[in-house]
């Protein structure tokens, strides 16, 4: 009798499971469908206001040695939930973030072997997140991922803003093309000279991937909460308009080592028919774990200058102290080396930067090239490249700390690893202790070149764990992290808000290689910045590098566009990257950089079209001050600023930094004018932006 | 005119360099010849008392992508030197060691590209050491070793005592065969079940390799001072009787990453016509760098017992605390886990071991399985396996430290890594600090299973650097290291005397798998122990493991042979490996283990033939006490003990522990008798050893 009852109960609960499960977003604009197909393979589909975002797409894995972990499933349970809460990021674009979503958790069991796999879907008004969950189960404890089979079947030949998939770099220029054109364009893009490259064998692109459909949908594909898992790239089937997960392997070809009782990152699909909603989305942050740091009082927004740009411009300044390249860390006596006479990070020179920072109200000075080892920073073949605790003879750590502290300025340490990551890990604790002993509270990490351990790529599971480990360990020392050449962010700054920014894309340094296009920064917020703040290092006033020496590169923007980037490129860590002497020549324009905030109460996306233009207004954290940035691509345009975000009934003074009348990034890039005007909530302003120009406004 | 003078000078110095260079050992028994052959390839040859040890053999490298770095050389300089000095090891077989050698340093330059390579030969009375040196030179700074081409051309089809080459393990049983037989025997030997195996693709064997020629020479090939370089295995050309270097690669196939301004390990050839000289040789220690630890007062010989053997005998005791295998370190709350009830390292049980150690004068107790993680110690696929600072709930670190300290006993910590080496390095400092905070001064490290980083093998350059790094870091914390499953030693204990012992061969644990042969310990001193002390863990009194449960293994020696091993198997770290209860049954025989020293003023090799027998006498460090051990293989024999090593004119009481009359390792292994006799310098004793039997003598 007992058996009979159980059967009935199971039939009752199993019955609805044979049909598709659906979930609606809180505002019901998005609809998710889930079902098992005839092979028992999990599938999902997504619509936005009735339009197809993702048509039926399969899910699952190949594990171990070609083991099927994507078919022959049955649904054993489905659970629904809804959450609606508000949380406060430590640093951010908004003081408060609402997390309102509906959730569906599908329990699956493979019929042949009883292996369990759960799928958790969270549907927000601005998109979908879903992840795989591997529940604890007896006899299924460890497995290797051969491939994740997640498919994103698009509804057409969308326009894509893409960089080629590569296991070691994300510093490619961004190409805009139809999906169908990617195969014929990708090889050329991959020729881009970069410090370490490991292209995928097939046609694939990286996330965040921005798409625009012919029926007016903006779709962004990425991932959230990348923990103990490789980064996801996307295979491209150009004819089927199909994208599918391509996880970054280790060099033995394994994509991931998994222990059950764990989850994958969230696969994210942010979608809207208004491009501004993509930039305004907090979906990725919402899918990350809450802050794991109890006391966050030491985490602060930072505006900084640095001994940095001078290394790129061809003026002769070097990271290295000596021209002698036969260096063995711990053996070479630097006191006996002959200095090359043009080492950037020397005490007197750094003091000038500190003076400038103090004079103009900057929080900090980054100093690169302060430590032993740069003479022979030979990637991959050399394991112990740098000392992380020994400064060059001409860089007086103690004296500079005191000098800076007396002027209220912090120094930012650099830990370039040249990707000898194991060596960095070996010295991580002593490196952080050295920082704390000398008054540093922020580090810029760097991962140029191929990785040691030599089984690993920049974006594989092992390195993902490394970056997270550094952020977590730094938090214990109350150190903020700004990682360069790391895997692109996935919203982890919510969990570790001391991980204040990353590079992880083509930054301003490429302006010194003639490498950025005018449209570049109108795309980045739709791609790279979807995962988190970027240390883009804007603020280049002297755009013609021929001034310094042999470098023939020219900045690809007007001067005012450089100002606007402080608003359009969100980061709580903002550099004024140019040389102090160049700012001194344009102190009026420089005032905007001095004034602009780096942490915000509110953000208003006023205008946006990927590849064309972006206009954003933001309110300073805790202050009645607003800053507006507007940028355009190679085409001039008229920005429309609607000041309705201002409080009612009050009049404010706005200072406008505009491109000069004949400004043009090619012919007249440094022409600008500054004026003030009164604005209220009702003001609407039309303002012309020059080709690759901008507009910056501060309001008090 | 200036040019002309230079030419003359060069001709003068170049003239003799066209002919072979020779070097004689201090006693002139050994003669080394060096010349460049017609291809400009460096070659060497070695004779002992006129007999060929190595006939002309080539030297050099293939580097980078098949670049020739072994021919087209010219000799640019040859320098000769002689050294004769005495040094004192911190712990050792002898209080003083003489380093008397003649040296020849040959400077070579490759004619086509100017790349320089030096060869340094040191010729001792007991053998030859030579190494490659890569001087600092402009335009040749970093290179990869594709293969080292060092050849050892033997004079005939010698008898060899060998284990198969393997990048991940050295725990094979030792095979004795002619060189010509190795190819047909090796596959079978490689079937041996071991935790991690990575056999070489070709026929090759490991060093230390012991050889015996038909004309009566004993030749031992190994290396000294293995630093920042992979271990050397030896390719076997069975028909040519030729051995050649086979360096352990990383998984990308690179053998070594070299920066000029460095040296290789020494290739060592210990040779004599008396097997005893091989065991007495200090050549390998002499070729290592002097001690790098300034204050060595904390390094001491240690006799210990341990919660260890009980895990092997099948009695049910486990390293793991719980049977729940779903463990995540840092997440799993062990307080909430159900204990399995048979966890070995529990406080009460450990106290019994401490009591026993204190009662019988042992210095320390090793406790394995004390820390979180053993339930799911899944090699290679799991990176964070153990906590190195969190004890199991039933192991009270503080209480046990106090308990042991009150009784004058130390605890030895275990750091099993299961070869998740990166994770161990991440936690190394906190692990060592935890040890010091809790009174530990010695650690047993373990490397079971394949390595993470997943590009690496146990014996490759990266792991070699790891083992050295652990020893060096431990020294900073005043911690002694006993490494298991590490690369075999190469005399590094001279430089880091806190690296007191290693396993790195087939130890006593294999007695519990029915795995050791009677001859095993008559070969090990000629092979594995040539590089340094072995933590062989002898002292198994209860040899029939059927007593405990389902384990059918039986010890392959008599009980007395177990005693003799404390003398024949040199180690300053000696375990009494059996259960206390088994010693309590044989307290009379146990007395020898209690008495025997672990550090020595002098060592006298009385009898020795690899594979057959060894008889050694040693004088205790700083005491007028002597201990003698004699062992034999499966054949009974009569040992001849010549007491002439004793001081003149004094009479001493010797206690003899002998095999019983009918003792036999197969049928009657635990039969022994104990008697005393008076001995003087003139005494000569003949004593029968049973099949796989032994003899142990203590003299006061």
Image (cartoon, coloured by chain):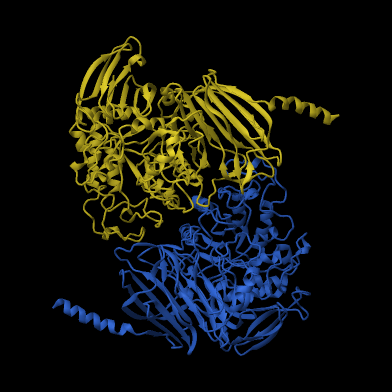
Chain colours: A yellow, B blue
Could you tell me how many numbered marks the image carries?
A: 0
Q: In this view, does B382 lie above or below A517?
A: below
Q: Is residue A291 above or below residue A253?
A: above
Question: Which one is in front, A550 or B313?
Answer: A550
Q: From the viewer's perspective, tell me whether residue B242 is left or right of residue A399.
A: right
Q: From the viewer's perspective, tell me whether residue A651 is left or right of residue B539.
A: left
Question: Which one is in front, B579 or B228?
Answer: B228
At 39% from the left and 46% from the top, the residue drawn is A447
Q: Position of residue A98 (x, y in %)?
A: 49, 22
At 43% from the left and 38% from the top, the residue drawn is A182
Q: In this view, does B229 lie above or below A604?
A: below
Question: Which one is in front, B154 or A388?
Answer: B154
Q: Where is residue B436 in the image (x, y as percent from the top left)?
A: 52, 54
Q: In which quarter of the image is the C terminus of chain B?
A: bottom right
Q: Position of residue A115 (x, y in %)?
A: 68, 40
Q: From the viewer's perspective, tell me whether residue B561 is left or right of residue B230.
A: right
Outermost residue toward the right in this view:
A1
Q: Position of residue B455 (x, y in %)?
A: 50, 55
Q: Is residue A298 visible?
A: no
Q: Is residue A595 above or below residue A486?
A: above
Q: Is residue B311 visible?
A: yes
Outermost residue toward the left in this view:
B1
Q: In which quarter of the image is the N terminus of chain B?
A: bottom left
Q: From the viewer's perspective, tell me whether residue A255 is left or right of residue A452.
A: right
Question: Which one is in front, B37 or A186?
Answer: A186
């Amino acid at each position: 009798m007992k058996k009979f009852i159980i059967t009935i109960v199971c039939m009752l609960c199993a019955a609805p499971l044979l049909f598709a499960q659906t979930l609606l977003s809180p505002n019901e604009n998005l609809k998710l469908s889930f079902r098992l197909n005839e092979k028992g393979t999990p599938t999902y589909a997504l619509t936005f206001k009735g339009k197809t975002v993702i048509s039926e797409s399969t899910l699952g894995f190949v594990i171990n040695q070609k083991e099927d972990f994507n078919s022959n499933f049955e649904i054993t349970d489905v659970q629904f939930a809804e959450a609606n809460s508000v949380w406060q990021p430590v640093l951010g674009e908004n003081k408060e973030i609402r997390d309102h979503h509906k959730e569906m958790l599908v329990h699956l069991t493979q019929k042949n072997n009883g292996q369990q796999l759960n799928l958790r879907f969270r549907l927000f008004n601005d998109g979908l997140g879903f992840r795989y969950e591997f529940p604890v189960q007896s006899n299924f404890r460890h497995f290797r991922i051969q491939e994740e089979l997640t498919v994103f079947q698009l509804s057409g030949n969308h326009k894509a803003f893409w960089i080629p998939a590569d296991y070691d770099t994300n510093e490619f220029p961004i190409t805009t093309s139809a999906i169908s054109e990617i195969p014929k364009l990708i090889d050329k893009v991959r020729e881009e000279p970069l410090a370490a490259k490991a292209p995928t064998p097939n046609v694939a692109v990286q996330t965040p991937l921005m798409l625009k459909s012919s029926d007016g949908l903006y779709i962004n594909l990425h991932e959230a909460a990348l923990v103990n898992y490789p980064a996801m790239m996307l295979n491209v089937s150009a004819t089927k308009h199909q994208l599918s997960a391509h996880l970054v392997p280790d060099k033995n070809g394994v994509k991931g080592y998994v222990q059950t009782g764990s989850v994958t990152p969230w696969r994210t699909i942010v979608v809207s028919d208004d491009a501004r909603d993509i930039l305004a989305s907090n979906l990725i942050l919402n899918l990350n774990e809450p802050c794991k740091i109890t006391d966050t009082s030491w985490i602060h927004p930072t505006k900084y200058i640095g001994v940095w740009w001078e290394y790129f411009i061809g003026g002769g300044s070097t990271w290295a102290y000596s021209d002698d390249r036969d260096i063995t860390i711990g053996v070479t006596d630097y006191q006996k080396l002959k200095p090359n006479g043009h080492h950037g990070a020397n005490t007197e020179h750094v003091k000038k930067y500190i003076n400038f920072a103090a004079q103009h109200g900057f929080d900090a000075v980054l100093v690169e090239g302060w430590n032993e080892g740069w003479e022979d920073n030979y990637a991959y073949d050399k394991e112990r490249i740098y000392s992380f605790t020994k400064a060059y003879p001409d860089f007086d750590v103690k004296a500079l700390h005191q000098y800076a502290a007396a002027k209220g300025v912090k120094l930012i340490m650099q830990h370039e690893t040249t990707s000898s990551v194991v060596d960095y890990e070996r010295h991580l604790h002593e490196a952080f202790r050295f920082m704390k002993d000398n008054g540093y509270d922020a580090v810029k990490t760097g991962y140029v070149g191929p990785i040691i351990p030599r089984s690993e790529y920049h974006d594989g599971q092992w390195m993902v764990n490394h970056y997270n480990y550094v952020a977590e360990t730094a938090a214990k020392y109350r150190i903020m992290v700004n990682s360069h050449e790391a895997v692109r962010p996935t919203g982890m700054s919510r969990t570790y808000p001391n991980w204040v920014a990353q590079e992880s894309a083509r930054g301003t340094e490429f302006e010194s290689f003639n490498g950025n296009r005018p449209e570049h920064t109108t795309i980045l917020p739709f791609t790279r910045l979807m995962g988190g703040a970027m240390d883009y290092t804007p603020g280049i006033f002297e755009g013609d590098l021929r001034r310094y020496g042999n470098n023939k590169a020219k900045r690809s923007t007007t001067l005012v566009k450089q100002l606007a980037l402080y608003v359009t490129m969100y980061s709580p860590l903002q550099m004024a990257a140019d040389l102090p002497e160049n700012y001194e020549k344009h102190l009026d324009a420089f005032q905007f950089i001095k004034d602009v905030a780096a942490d915000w109460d509110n953000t208003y996306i006023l205008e946006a079209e990927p590849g064309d233009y972006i206009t954003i207004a933001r309110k300073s954290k805790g202050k009645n001050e607003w800053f507006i940035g507007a940028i355009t691509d190679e085409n001039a345009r008229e920005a429309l600023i609607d000041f309705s975000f201002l409080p009612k009934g009050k009049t404010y003074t706005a200072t406008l930094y505009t491109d000069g009348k004949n400004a043009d990034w090619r012919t007249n890039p440094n022409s600008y004018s500054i004026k003030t005007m009164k604005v209220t909530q009702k003001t609407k302003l039309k303002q012309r932006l020059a080709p690759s120009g901008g507009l910056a406004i501060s309001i008090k």
